[in-house]
Amino acid sequence: MVLSFLVQGQAPSNPILGFLPILLIFAIFYFLLFLPMQRQRKQQQKLLRELQPGNLVVTSGGVMGTIVSLDDETVILRVKPDNLKIQVTRSSVAGLVPEKK
């Protein structure tokens, strides 16, 4: 009987403290997942803006080629060994191939 009286007599806790763990989880997700993804997306956009004819690139499909020409949306690549020219979207370029020394 005394125990039930003590439980009923407690003052209600602050509702903001109840949301604190949830806010903490969102902050952790932001710093561990979303922030690095935003940085990677900005780096990819910078790479795509700075493409120039003569760059050796690899596409997201794994095709390696040298840029012959490009415009706002497409890139024309020369692919070895037969020097085929293929047209791909600019966004399909995954990265630059480092030059061999």
Image (cartoon, grey):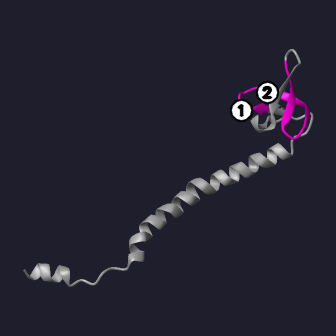
Q: Secondary structure at mark 1?
A: loop
Report x, y in % for residue 33. 57, 53
Classify the position of the N terminus by image quarter. Answer: bottom left
Q: Amino acid at mark 2?
A: Met
Q: Is residue 46 above or below residue 98?
A: below
Question: Magenta region: which residues?
Answer: 58-80
**Residue located 80% across and 49% down the image:** 46
Q: Is residue 98 visible?
A: yes
Which residue is at a point 81% across and 43% down the rendered structure image? 48
Residue 89 as seen in the image, left or right of residue 53: left
Are the residues at dot 2 and dot 1 in contact (C-beta closer than 8 Å)? no
Residue 31 position within the rendered picture, expressed as x and y whole percent measured from the top left: 58, 60
Tag of residue 64: 2
- Whether residue 69 is in magenta: the answer is yes
Dominant SS type (magenta): strand
Is residue 100 shown above or below 18?
above
User: Measuring 71% from the left and 28% from the top, which residue is drawn there?
Assistant: 61
Residue topped by disc 1: 60
Label 2, residues with CA under 10 Å away: few <14, some 14-19, many ≥20: some
Q: Quadrant of the C terminus?
A: top right
Q: Nearer the viewer, residue 15 or 28?
A: 15
Q: Specify the quadrant of the image occupied by residue 89.
A: top right
Residue 74 lies left or right of residue 24; in this view the side is right
Relative depth, front residue between 65 and 49? 49
Residue in view at x 80 percent, y 45 percent: 47
Disc 2 is placed on an element classified as strand
